Amino acid sequence: MKRRATEESNPFVKALLKLYAFVYAADRKFGFPRPVTAPTIRRQRLFAIILLACQTGITFTGSLVRVTGSGLGCDTWPQCHPGSLLPVPGSAPWIHQLIEFGNRTLTFVLIIACLICLIAVVRAARRSSILHLAFVQGIGIIAQAVIGGITVHMDLMWWMVALHFLPSMLLVFLAAKLVVRIGEPDDGEMQPLMPRPLRILTDGSAISLAVVLMTGTLVTSAGPHAGDEAILPEHRLQVPLIDMAHIHAGFMYLYLGLTIGLLAGVFALNLERRIKTASYWVIAAIIVQAAIGIMQYWLGVPRWSVPLHVIGSGLSTAATGFLWALKSRYSGGNASHTGTTTGDSQRHEAVNAKDG
């Protein structure tokens, strides 16, 4: 770790590598269980999957806050009510307090999942790109907590609510990429798994997803669910809901078309099975999302449909993240146990010491 920091010329990356080296040294000295050994790739990946599930899940609980009008169940931040970290009986309807405070509490579960994942990859001394992905998750969670607090202080202004949702989707996308990258030994070499035209098509699919998500937040901002019953219609996005929904649907069809084109290319070239599987999941998620969106359009956006659409957004984003990460991979490495030669050596020495 220290050697990586010494060899790095970029001052920002150098500072990050020094931070990782400090965490690594502290973990070697104070970590548990003793002796401290690098976790296996399988365990690292499990922690990353749990983190991905938490990132996706908290968007679902956030949508419950919105559709139940519980956004001001805790009317300040970081406290729930002025002078109290916990809900104060009578300050707001108890169900609103329960839902909003529960959503805030889940943030701490997400933080714990992130810390465990970060410590695992640092303990294994994984390559810098994996360390950066895990670190960004932590920074993103902190940023999201701050944005959420600002959103509450601004009485759930529609553009702040939209701004609060989109970084969550980015974190889901990056967590999916982390799950894929953790499974690749660090001593291999990066090799493309798709020809250049399909890699460009994969990038196009991911970009179209981003536009779909952005237009989706605008549909929600113009819709009936503001996040709190006290928010008046004139404080919503003043755009015809039907027009915004049509724009959103148009980009969704673009997203679907690009992904179908990608799948056709994957089959034509008979690429790896996991690339085909990821493409299937992306298309399936888009179709389900489209069905929910069409149903919302004709039924007038019933409350119960919004959490389904939000969790579908998370699953679509995760599937697209998996597919995007599969454009290339590290291959040919020998560090198949922990992902690094250093970690494999540590575990080998620990096993020998135990047997001895």
Image (spheres, rainbow, N blue to C red):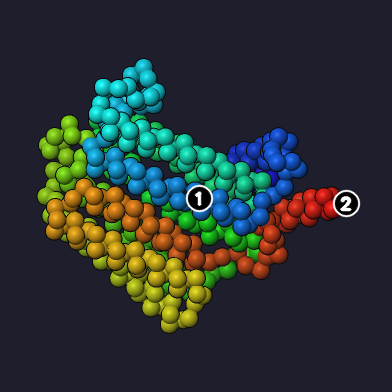
Element type where label 2 sits in the image: loop
Classify residue 128 as left or right of residue 352.
left
User: Where does the image place residue 63, in percent across and percent down from the top left?
Assistant: 30, 44
- Which amino acid type is marked by label 2? Gly
Q: Residue at x 18, y 34 (%)?
A: 229
Q: Residue at x 75, y 53 (%)?
A: 347
Q: Earlier in the sequence, mark 2 or mark 1?
A: 1
- Residue 255 picture quarter: bottom left
Mark 1 neighbour class, 10 Å CA radius: few under 14, some 14 to 19, many 20 or more: some
Q: Is residue 110 above or below residue 172?
A: above
Element type where label 1 sits in the image: helix
* Residue 158 visible in this rendered orientation of the protein: no
Classify residue 210 as left or right of residue 136.
left
Classify residue 113 as left or right of residue 228.
right
User: Where does the image place residue 230, in percent across and percent down from the top left?
Assistant: 17, 31
Classify residue 221 as left or right of residue 197.
left
Q: Is residue 10 above or below residue 127?
A: above
According to the picture, the residue beneath numbered tag 1 turns out to be 50
According to the picture, the residue beneath numbered tag 2 turns out to be 356
Q: Residue at x 16, y 44 (%)?
A: 224
* Residue 60 visible in this rendered orientation of the protein: yes
Residue reaching furthest right? 356
User: Where does the image place residue 248, in percent across and percent down from the top left?
Assistant: 22, 57
Q: Residue at x 28, y 57 (%)?
A: 212
Of the 4 image quadrants, the one containing the N terminus is top right
